[in-house]
């Protein structure tokens, strides 16, 4: 089994590489009627971009919202494969549209087409299936009507999307044709991952070695000279912003009933609260509607001027909105010491991967003003527009400023080397003792060490606790010491495998069949993604900049 781990690593690396689709940025985009982006000379305007990207993604999402998961998985497979790895929705949309155009061009060269008639037949044969497994025309009609109302996507455009999905599956199968993994290898790898291993470890802590290390000033300075790039000041940003974010302080609070109150009194108290809260909510919505319109006008002015009127528009919205709008310019600040009025804001999008400060610092400072401006929905119903006025890039710290950090890092590096050298020397002696017939316990005691009996180890139990231990133990023969140490940032372990077993449960033949089917599908996607990466790398792309 040990010899199969190399293939496991290769497959994982290929999969990781295949999921990253690189894009070559070009010029900025224009509005409808002008070129927004170009792929191998095929130019599209902003309206076409919106239809190819946002509408197609919305069509897929609508399946999930309507609980039609069978069709959702079909089209989401298409969207995910062409969207690649993206940190924002706009980057996902740009990736999808770019790769959609590349796929259209490549499929034509390959002679692969799908007509509207084929798409219509596919829809009737494979999609919108009712409980009896047959095509449900009512469900299809309702979906098309909802799609039209939601994003303006017509039935013919949906059929085109389905036609492209059909071509996508054909190209994917063609690109991956003839590729397969050895089933014996796949089954052996699966069994390696499913085994239970009984281990004992000898542990070494870096702190035990660090306390004896006291480098001189000259050694620290020499270390700093070699590793200067580790010791830099933080990136600083100076912002101007326009914020409208109504306070919730005056929102009526739900009263807590007094235990001595009668049911009638409790009902009266609750009704009074509900009446007050309904009135507050109504006034809040009306107030917010006005502020949102003012903020929208501000944004329109800024975008129409490519960012040039930010200050003038901010002054106007402040004059009209009064205390409901806050306009300010910050001092330069780092990501971990942002002004309180900004750091306390929460993004309205609950699914956002980062907070507002992290989102701002994720932006790249540009020579083009418009790209230094961004807008966010915050709080319950607020909005903020920010403009990055200045970026102070990280700079190497002087030795005096970095000396303490350099000293700590040098001690850590020296202690880590001393720990690993010591652990490896002890491991070699233990291996030699076992070869001479000693038990592991006797060999450990003879070296003045202590062994820790670990709980039975499985891949699942090791994921959080110690994945490195399982990775090394799974390819170590029972009653032997692992050939390598388990290394962590603050420790090292010698691993002895006492026993390893594979518990066979259920229908193993069915499990193997399902495993091989999953592997075949995964291999198709690896091959397709690699092919798509090559298309990107050789294409002539002029793409808009996105956040």
Image: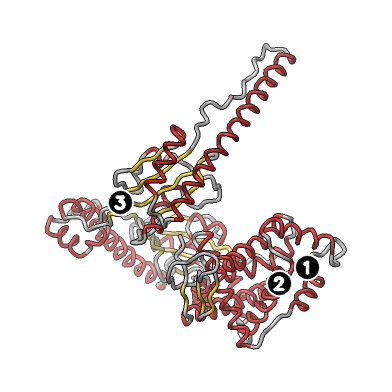
Circle 2 sits in a helix, a strand or a loop, which is it? helix
**Which mark is first along the chain, 1 or 2?**
1
Question: Where residue 244 sits: x, y (%)?
Answer: 47, 39
- Is 183 located above or below residue 496 in the figure? below
**Which mark is first along the chain, 3 or 2?**
2
Name the mark nearer the viewer: 2 or 1. 2
Disc 1 residue crowd, few under 14, some 14–19, many 20+, Cα 10 Å: many
Question: Where residue 28 sits: x, y (%)?
Answer: 44, 67
Residue for point 60% across, 30% down = 283
Residue for point 33% across, 67% down = 424
Q: Which mark is residue 162?
A: 2
Contact (CB < 8 A) between labels 2 and 3?
no
Question: Where residue 70 sits: x, y (%)?
Answer: 74, 64
Quadrant containing the N terminus is bottom right
Circle 1 sits in a helix, a strand or a loop, which is it? loop
Gap in Å between the C-alphas at discs 3 and 1?
53 Å
According to the picture, the residue beneath numbered tag 3 turns out to be 236
**Relative side of 350 to 432, left or right:** right
Using the image as rendered, state which of residue 308 and residue 243 is in the foreground.
308
Residue for point 44% across, 73% down = 24
- Farthest residue to the left: give it: 218
Residue for point 58% across, 63% down = 196
**Which mark is first along the chain, 1 or 3?**
1
Question: Where residue 393 sits: x, y (%)?
Answer: 28, 57
According to the picture, the residue beneath numbered tag 1 turns out to be 127
> Residue 224 is drawn in which quadrant?
bottom left
**Relative side of 38 to 81, left or right:** left
Using the image as rendered, state which of residue 270 and residue 492 is in the foreground.
270
């Amino acid at each position: 089994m040990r010899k199969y781990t190399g293939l496991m690593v290769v497959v994982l690396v290929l999969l990781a590489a295949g999921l990253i689709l690189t894009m070559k940025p070009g010029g900025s985009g224009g509005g409808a009627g002008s070129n927004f982006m170009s792929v191998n000379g095929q130019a599209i305007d902003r309206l076409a971009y919106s239809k190819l990207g946002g509408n197609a993604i919305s069509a897929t999402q609508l399946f999930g919202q309507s609980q039609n998961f069978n069709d959702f998985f079909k089209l989401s497979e298409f969207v995910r494969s062409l969207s690649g790895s993206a940190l924002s929705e706009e980057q996902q949309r740009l990736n999808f549209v770019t790769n959609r155009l590349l796929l259209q061009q490549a499929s034509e060269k390959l002679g692969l087409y799908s007509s509207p008639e084929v798409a219509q037949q596919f829809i009737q044969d494979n999609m919108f299936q009712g409980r009896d497994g047959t095509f449900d025309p009512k469900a299809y009609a309702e979906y098309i009507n909802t799609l039209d109302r939601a994003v303006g996507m017509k039935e013919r455009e949906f059929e085109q999307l389905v036609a492209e999905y059909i071509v996508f599956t054909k190209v994917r199968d063609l690109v991956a044709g003839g590729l397969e993994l050895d089933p014996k290898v796949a089954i052996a790898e699966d069994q390696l991952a499913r085994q239970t291993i009984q281990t004992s470890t000898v542990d070494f802590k870096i702190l035990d070695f660090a306390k004896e290390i006291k480098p001189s000033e000259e050694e620290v300075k020499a270390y700093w000279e070699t590793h200067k790039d580790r010791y830099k000041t933080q990136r600083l940003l100076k912002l101007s912003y326009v914020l409208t974010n109504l306070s919730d302080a005056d929102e009526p609070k739900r009263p807590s009933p007094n235990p001595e109150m009668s049911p009638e009194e409790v009902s009266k108290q609750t009704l009074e609260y509900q009446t007050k809260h309904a009135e507050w909510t109504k006034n809040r919505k009306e107030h917010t509607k006005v502020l949102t319109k003012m903020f929208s006008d501000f944004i329109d002015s800024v975008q129409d001027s490519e960012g040039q009127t930010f200050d003038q528009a901010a002054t106007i919205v402040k004059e009209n909105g009064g205390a409901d709008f806050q306009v300010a310019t910050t001092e330069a600040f780092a990501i971990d010491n942002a002004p309180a009025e900004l750091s306390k804001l929460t993004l309205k999008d609950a699914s956002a991967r980062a907070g507002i400060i992290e989102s701002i610092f994720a932006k790249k400072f540009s020579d083009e003003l418009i790209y230094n401006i961004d807008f966010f929905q915050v709080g319950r119903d607020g909005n903020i527009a920010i403009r990055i006025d200045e970026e102070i890039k990280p700079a190497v710290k002087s030795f005096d400023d970095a000396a303490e950090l350099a000293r700590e890092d040098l001690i850590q590096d020296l202690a880590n080397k001393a720990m690993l050298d010591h652990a490896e020397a002890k491991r070699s002696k233990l291996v030699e003792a076992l070869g001479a017939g000693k038990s592991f316990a006797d060999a450990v005691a003879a070296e003045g060490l202590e062994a820790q009996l670990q709980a039975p180890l499985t891949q699942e139990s090791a994921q959080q606790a110690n994945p490195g231990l399982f990775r090394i133990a799974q390819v170590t023969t029972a009653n032997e010491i692992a050939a390598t140490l388990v290394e962590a940032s603050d420790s090292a372990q010698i691993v002895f495998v006492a026993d390893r077993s594979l518990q066979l449960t259920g229908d193993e033949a069915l499990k193997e069949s399902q495993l091989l089917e999953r592997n075949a599908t995964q291999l198709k996607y690896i091959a397709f993604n690699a092919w798509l990466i090559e298309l990107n790398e050789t294409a002539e792309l002029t793409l808009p900049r996105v956040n």
